[in-house]
Amino acid sequence: GEDVEQSLFLSVREGDSSVINCTYTDSSSTYLYWYKQEPGAGLQLLTYIFSNMDMKQDQRLTVLLNKKDKHLSLRIADTQTGDSAIYFCANPGGTSYGKLTFGQGTILTVHP
Amino acid sequence: DTGVSQNPRHKITKRGQNVTFRCDPISEHNRLYWYRQTLGQGPEFLTYFQNEAQLEKSRLLSDRFSAERPKGSFSTLEIQRTEQGDSAMYLCASSLGSRTDTQYFGPGTRLTVL
């Protein structure tokens, strides 16, 4: 089945850039997604990228997709303390109805 | 903003009791999903509804679990004879079934089985 892997922890200083990485095995999906989860809360959609794109920029967020290596990354520019959360990449694979397989999540800690 | 809502937000129960959770999706969304998230893990897919039809169930969904979506609107997830291993956050999501098929999640129901 599909496997999605992420590094578990990332710690940065306020104002620096954060880069969260994700690798996946099923490359048949049309879109790949990034979600954010704050403590005790549900998941908030951050952004998504179409599988035939290499890059997507959305304000402070930049998503890079390397289909050959099956690698997805999320860059957060000028990281703020409010960005501290768990970030998940999610892959619907080849299902027609978008069943998402999530990575384990990367805990981002932003220090003042 | 009428996002996905879930009730209750928290449920504490004793082992062996039955519990039921409710999810109200975004009103025009015809797809509804249930996921389970345990501590330190990403959400895992449980089941999927297209309108009122339950079209896929994960092997995680044992025979103690049942989900319904009468009339294709809200959905309920029932767990019978709860076990301590059922303690988790239960997340509901809905989508329009559009090209991007973006899933929007509710705040979740946290279940604690004592």
Image (cartoon, coloured by chain):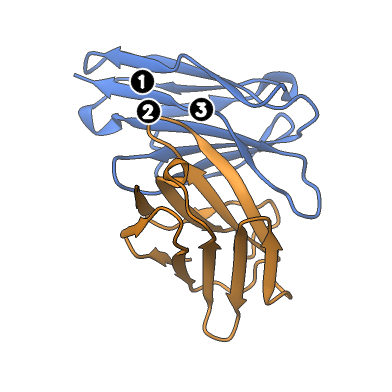
Chain colours: A orange, B blue
Secondary structure beneath disc 3?
loop
| First of labels 3, 1 by sequence position | 1
- Left or right, B108 with respect to A62, comes to left
Chain ID at mark 3: B
Q: CA distance from mark 2 to mark 1?
A: 5 Å
Q: Is residue A50 visible?
A: no
Name the residue rendered at 56%, 55% in the picture: A34
Q: Relative to B111, does residue A75 appear above or below in the rendering?
A: below
State the residue in front, B78 or A86: A86
Name the residue rendered at 60%, 57% in the picture: A33
State the residue in front, B21 or A50: A50
What's the amino acid at mark 3? Pro
| First of labels 2, 3 by sequence position | 2
Q: Is residue A73 visible?
A: yes
Dot 2 corresponds to which residue?
Answer: B64
What's the amino acid at mark 2? Arg
Q: Position of residue B102 (x, y in %)?
A: 69, 47
Chain ID at mark 1: B
**Pointer 2 with pointer 1, Cβ within 8 A:** yes
The circle on residue B80 is: 1
Q: Relative to A6, does residue B25 appear above or below in the rendering?
A: above
